Amino acid sequence: MTSLKPFHADDLFRVDDVNLDVLTENFHIAFYLSYLTTWPTLFFSSENPRGEITGYMMGKAEGKGKEWHSHITCLSVSSRYRRIALARTLVDNLEFRSEGPPYDAYFIDLFVRSTNALAIGMYKDFGYSVYRRVVGYYSGGGSGSSTDEEDAFDMRKPLKRDVKRESIRANGENFKVSPEEVYS
């Protein structure tokens, strides 16, 4: 049995079991704290009955007009708690929080490596689709050649406010943009 709870600053000292995993992106403490202070209702964790953190969700809200949306910055589940629908529970909770006040978002999006078939399949099972391919979004930190870069898929799921489903498109894998176009 797992329960959801708000993430607190001291939880950063209890996420090792979740973060010490090659599948999890790790951030510096200031990054976690900035999310916690700016979007506290979109940053939450799951705990087992012993009070151990089994997963967490870091989300934020951003954009303007019909681009107003929630973004999944980090979804991570402890390896011991995978394949029991905990990731779906965390995503469902973010979707629920994003649809109502104060956010009233049009959609939720996330970025995933275009080669991460497991994550892409999971998000597609959750109702997300590829909106666009961001060419060279991830850098490998190597010699700086183009082979050190990897594309990202911007995956989206429309929420109830997007009545006309304008936030998604068919064949998004073929719609290529640069990283600069994503943030302009």
Image (cartoon, rainbow, N blue to C red):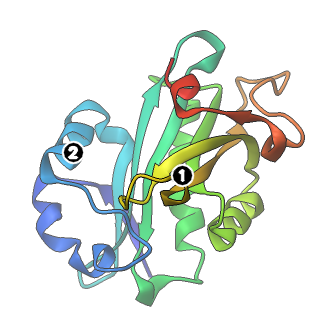
Inspect the image, locate mark 2, and give the three-letter code of the amino acid beneath it: Phe
Query: Are circles 2 and 1 on residues that touch, CB within 8 Å?
Result: no
Disc 2 element: helix
Q: Earlier in the sequence, mark 2 or mark 1?
A: 2
Q: Nearer the viewer, residue 24 or 4?
A: 24
| Residue tagged 1 | 146
Q: Is residue 35 left or right of residue 157?
A: left
Q: Nearer the viewer, residue 142 or 57?
A: 142
Q: Residues within 10 Å of mark 1 (few under 14, many from 20)?
A: few
Point out the residue furthest to the right here.
170
Q: Is residue 77 left or right of residue 154?
A: left
- Residue in the picture at 79% in, 47% down: 173
On screen, 148 above or below 133?
A: below
Distance between the alpha carbons at the discs numbered 2 and 1 = 28 Å
Quarter that holds the N terminus: bottom left
| Residue tagged 2 | 31
On screen, 181 above or below 134?
A: above
- Residue in the picture at 52% in, 45% down: 137
Query: Image quarter for residue 177?
Result: top right
- Residue in the picture at 48% in, 59% down: 148
Disc 1 element: helix
| Residue 36 % position (x, y) | 23, 42
Residue 15 visible in the current orientation? yes
Q: Is residue 49 left or right of residue 133?
A: left
| Residue 178 % position (x, y) | 60, 32
Inspect the image, locate mark 1, and give the three-letter code of the amino acid beneath it: Ser
- Residue in the picture at 48% in, 51% down: 138
Query: Image quarter for residue 107?
Result: top right
Point out the residue furthest to the bottom here.
80
